[in-house]
Amino acid sequence: MQDRLWIRDPLAILAEGAERGVVVEGDRIAELVPKGAEPAAAVQRIFDAARHVVTPGLVNAHHHFYSNLTRTHPDGIDKPLMPWLAALYPRWAAKLNPDNFRLASRMALTELLLSGCTTASDHHAMFARGLEDAMDIEAEEAARLGMRITLVRGSRDLSVKDGMLAPENVVETVDAILADSERVARRYHDRSEGAMTQVAFAPDSPFTVSETLMRETAALAERLDCRLHTHLAERREEVTAARELWGCRPVERMQDLGWISERVWLAHAIHLDATEIATLGRHGVSVCHCPTSSMMLGAGHCRTCELEAAGVAIGLGADASAANDVSNLMGEVRQAMLLNRLTYDPRDVTHRDSLRWGTEGSARCLGRRDIGAIAVGLQADLALYRPEGLRFSGAGDPLAALVYCAADRADRVMVKGEWVVEDGLPRGVDLDELIFEHTRASKAFLEAV
């Protein structure tokens, strides 16, 4: 029999009937302990959580790790999406290499972990020459930290010579993309419950890659049982472009490409009409809301409440670290609540709603039912926060305080029943050394291309 750990008497917990905490056995949540009760079976270890608020481990459903090498880059600040991309694409294409990409991945994952994120996904489509093993690097770095990851094998097959922004050296042929996508899936895609590593396929967007790549990628995902991901309707101009190119709106085009199904989750999905929203809900498509990125780039506001009412699962993503400019999922939870209250009544987007988006909703985006909530039988992925210090002084509701008072760092984080952050420090990471090496690598991106 495995040891049973009782996380006892938390200050607050995001679970019903667990006022006295949870019992973890092996990699799963074995028991919720209600008010006035004791665990039903003997426990071998106890963690006193009287100063902690406990949530499910947060889940990041959309990111671009490498871009943290260009945070607040002088060429990229104060720009909307397309000028921002035009300014930074050449630098990423010219300067990304395996060494600085590894540092960027380690930095992004560490930031996410310290914010209480236990599962990350990274949409990587910047395969500069020499960076063919990017997915392997991300898998290694996530394993090193003890985090779950969905390796989102992105792709581009059209470049500047085709009228796109992507430099020539970061695009691949369709055959090369499909071959490496299959390699990555066969090596890393674990379909079992409690999997630490899974794989999804993600052409950049239907506007920036070929129809052939979109269709062939969807067919490959069906054959290998992987999920599908892409950017859609982030800019209002995409609606006009879709009409001009294909005589329809973006979601109708995605239907034609075989991309509207339960296998798909979309990043942003901001500029949709009521018919498109109903279509996504009817077919089980999920949407990752990226509030900070949307505000930073002036992209617009995702219609989260209408999407949820239609049956669409809403998750949260940090998106590009150069359009955020941090990788903090608890920060995204707060931003999601605040941004949505510019459109909806505060009673319709509560702190519990935004926490749900960052946990259960994001897990659904990634196709997972074994994480994202605190319930018996689910994986023991937990984030414990200590609401202490000036910003929390006087807070009456400890759970609400995490969101309203801007918690930004977890004190303890558990993944698969193991502590991977203790006393605010990630296991096996020298933070000072990471910051030094990452800062040094980032300086190269300030130099002329």
Image (cartoon, rainbow, N blue to C red):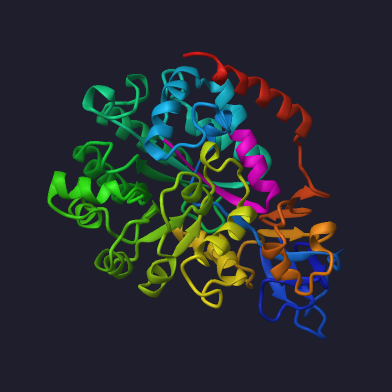
Please identify the quarter of the rendering in which residue 40 is found: bottom right
Above or below, comparing residue 97 to residue 29 in the picture: above
Above or below, comparing residue 440 to residue 302 in the picture: above
User: Does residue 262 appear anywhere in the picture?
Assistant: yes
Outermost residue, left side: 247
Q: Closest to the observer: 124 or 405?
A: 405
Q: Quadrant of the N terminus?
A: bottom right
Magenta span includes 113:
yes
Name which residue lies at 66% across and 55% down.
416
Please identify the quarter of the rendering in which residue 19 is found: bottom right
User: Does residue 366 appear anywhere in the picture?
Assistant: no
Q: Position of residue 122 (x, y in %)?
A: 49, 42
Name which residue lies at 47% across and 24% down.
92
Q: Position of residue 169 (x, y in %)?
A: 36, 19
Magenta span includes 306:
no
Name which residue lies at 46% across and 38% down.
187
Q: Closest to the observer: 437 or 192?
A: 437
Outermost residue, top side: 448
Disc count in the image? 0
Name which residue lies at 52% across and 60% down.
339
Please identify the quarter of the rendering in which residue 354 is found: bottom right
Q: Which residues are magenta?
A: 105-124
